[in-house]
Amino acid sequence: MKIHFHGTAAAEGFPGLFCRCEHCMKAIELGGKNIRTRTSVTIDDVLKIDFPPDTYYHVLRDRYHLARVEDLFITHTHHDHLYADDIRMRMPVFASEPAHPLNIYGHDMPMRLLTEHLERNETCFRFQRIVPFAAVEAKTARVTPLPADHNPMETCLLLYIERNGKRILYGHDTGWFPDETWSFLQGRTIDLAIMDCTNGLLPERRNHLNIEAVVEIQDIFRREGIFHPGSQMIATHFSHNIGLMHDDLSNIFEPHGIITAYDGMIHHVSELA
Ligand SMILES: [Zn+2]
Ligand SMILES: [Zn+2]
Ligand SMILES: [Zn+2]
C-alpha cells in the first residue's frame, strides 16, 4: 500500500504565508524538506484525506491525478483541510466527464459547507455524512471515524482505515485522544499511525499534539499491543512556531523509530507481513 504525503505543514504552511520570523527565513534559506505545504495524504492514489488549498500544487509536483481518487474523507472544516471552491473544478465546464463519481465523506460541518458550494450532480459527487464510531464501507476502504480533540465547536474526526488487510490510524488534527477514542483502539491493531505534531517541543498537547505526546502515544500503543513489532508511526502537520527544521525533527524522532514526514514522501505499508 502506497501512502503519499503531499503536504506536512500546519495551516500557515512553512514558511508561513505572511511570516518573516527567523524560523521561516531559515526554512526559505535551506529549502528542500524544510518547505512544507498544507497537509494531505493519498493512499494508493484512490483514497484521499482532506483537500487543502495547496492541492493543485500537490497534483503538479507529485504527479498524481485527482481524477483517479474515488474516496475523499474530510476530517474537519479548517481551511487547511477543506478548500471547497477547488472541489467544484470537478464539475462540467471545468473538467471532462468523470469516469466515476467522487465519494465525499465528512461530519455535519464539512457536508454543510460542501453542499452549499457544489451543485447536486450525481455523476460528479456523492456525499455521505459520517459520525464517530459508525464504520463506512467506502469504495476503497472500510473507515471508522473517531472523535479528535481539536476544535471544541466542531466534531473533528480521526480515521481508522482498513484496506487490503492493513490498518492505518489517521491521527490529526488532534490533541491528546479523548477517552472514547482510546477505548475504541483498545484491543485493535494499527500497522501505521500518522500523527499530529503541530506543537513540536512546545509544552501544549491540547487541540494539537507535540513531540512528547506522540512518543507517549507510541509507548501506549506498544504496551497495549495496538502496535506490533512491524508497526510504524509517522509524525506530520508541523507549525512554523516550533522552529524545528526537518533534520532537527528527524534527529529527535529517529531514536524512537518514528519517521518525520516531508512533502512528497512516499511510505509503503507491506501487505505481505
Ligand atoms: Zn490543520
Ligand atoms: Zn514564521
Ligand atoms: Zn484544524
Image (cartoon, rainbow, N blue to C red):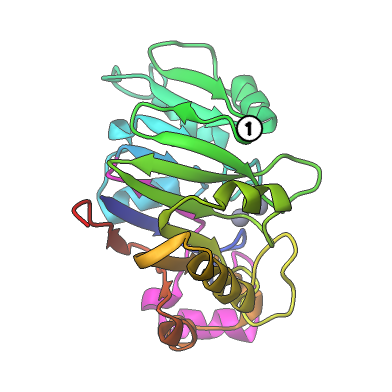
Seen as rendered, the residue at the extreme left is 272
Image check: 13 left or right of 181? left
Tell me: is circle 1 under 8 Å from ligand 3.
Answer: no
Image check: 1 left or right of 88? left
Does the segment drawn in magenta span residue 20?
A: yes
Badge 1 marks a residue whose secondary structure is: helix
Q: Residue at x 52, y 11 (%)?
A: 120
Residue 48 in picture, x, y percent from top left: 40, 41
Quarter of the picture containing the C terminus is bottom left
Query: Camera-side residue: 93 or 58?
Result: 58
| Ligand 1 image-quadrant field | bottom right
Image check: 47 left or right of 40? left
Does the segment drawn in magenta span residue 13?
A: no
Residue 123 in picture, x, y percent from top left: 38, 12
Above or below for 147 versus 150: above
At label 1, counting other C-alpha atoms closer than 10 Å, the crowd grade (few under 14, some 14-19, many 20 or more) is many
Query: Camera-side residue: 99 or 208?
Result: 208
Q: Residue at x 37, y 34 (%)?
A: 141
Residue 1 in picture, x, y percent from top left: 25, 50
Above or below for 109 versus 163: above
Q: Residue at x 44, y 67 (%)?
A: 233
Residue that label 1 marks: 110
Seen as rendered, the residue at the extreme right is 153
Above or below for 55 versus 21: above
- Extent of the magenta region: 16-45
Identity, as a three-letter code, of the amino acid under mark 1: Pro
